[in-house]
Amino acid sequence: MSTSPREVFRGWWIVAVAFAAQALAIGLSIIPYGLFIDPITEEFGASVMTANWGVAILFVVMTLVGPVVGWLVDRRSIRAIMVAGALLMSASFGLMSIATTLWQLGLLFGVGVGMGVAMLGPLSATAVVAKWFDRKRGRALGVAAIGPMAGGFLLTPLVGGLLESGDWRSVLQWFAVGVLGIVPLVWVVIRNRPEDLGQLPDGEVAPAPDAAPTSGGGIWTTVEILSARNFWGLALGVGIVFGLGTGWGANAPKYVLDLGYGTQQTAYLLAAGAGVGIPATVLFGWLAERFDGRVLLWISFGAQMASFAVLRLEPGFGLLVAAFVLIGFSAGAMLPVYASLIARMFGPVSFGQVMGLAGLVLLPFGTLAPPVIGLLRDTSGGYGSTLLLLIGSFAISCAVLGLLRGHAPRVPAMTTSPASYRIAGS
């Protein structure tokens, strides 16, 4: 059943704003980062490894504040948190455009933008979507997860063109203005849960007989989460891939530039990879409602490993495009499946806290990957050893996912305790 015409279900508007928030948060920070490496290293005389420390600091900050943000989104106003994140990102980009030293750039990007992304981006946006949906959660998360890919697809070519025709500082000023556009949308649309507006998950007018309440029941404690086998299997299995994969993403533009292609051509190649991630998020969000999430993640990881193997050969442009497209498609599958597994195993009311704590597991991988990959590039003159490292690490992640237990497409209804969300082996 659906809501009456007088009571338009807010959930899909929530999804739309979550989509836009992630497009700006990730599309203006992590995805285009590699395009700034060459102009920044040229202006400040820095190495590629040094330039990569900015994204490493960002990961440290995002991860350390993640548990706090996760705790807040489960208990306080999500729209206030997201608005504060957008304002912080805007201020940080503006100050970066007038920075005079490399350490200032690193501090503003890593701390200022990092905290802003943690508050505006995937953690808050995904958590609020998870709270508004139950039976349609996979699809809703899949649509919202298009945001980062869409941001990369639409913004990366624009950034590449601006960098070729102008100064990198003016591009950052445009970033500062652009991120402010999300503020009024977040303030008008976002609410923590459907009950805040007298609505029910999925737009139902009465609870479905087999539905698990989105907002009811108890919240898992930190000790309970950290004691759960499923938490460590999921956090480690996905955390290794997210951390190292993002480290590769920061260096992927340099890899293409080293092959002799120009900045604009490189930007279009990155955009193609981001673009194919758009249908992947919707497809795998839908699949996550019906199939074992662990198998879906294995498919994603395996496809990326095959692509890295192709890139080790430094192929011609045709295979290069194919590899980037496959990486983009398979990477786009990860977030909706990952988010669906969190909601299924721990319940949507504890979603933010679990996702924030899982970020701490990602910390060493996300922190060390960018500078280590940059160091390997500086010392070896190429990315062959890096790609071999990625293949091996992704294989380890596949094995770690074997720790997960309980993969039924539906969870039992929650009562008054998080115990009813604990499934076999958790």
Image (cartoon, rainbow, N blue to C red):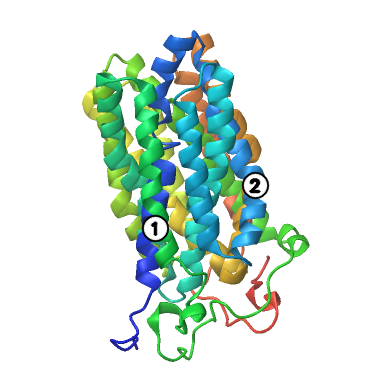
- Quadrant the C terminus occupies: bottom right
Specify few, some or many for label 1: CA neighbours under 10 Å numbering under 14, 14-19, or 20 or more: few
As drawn, the residue found furthest toward the right would be 223
Residue 69 sits in which quadrant?
Answer: bottom right
Frontmost residue, 234 versus 213:
213
Vertical side of 326 occupied by 15: above or below: below
* Residue 278 in view here: yes
**Label 2 vs label 1: CA separation?**
24 Å
Of the numbered discs in the image, which one, if any, rests on residue 184?
1
Q: Amino acid at mark 1?
A: Pro
Which secondary structure lies at badge 1?
helix
Residue tagged 2: 65
Percent position of residue 180, x then y: 40, 47
Say above or below: 329 vs 184.
above
Nearer the N terminus, badge 2 or badge 1? 2
Q: Report the side of 213 relative to 6 (left or right).
A: right
Residue at 34% over, 40% down: 152
Image quadrant where residue 266 sits: top left
Type of the residue with mark 2: Val
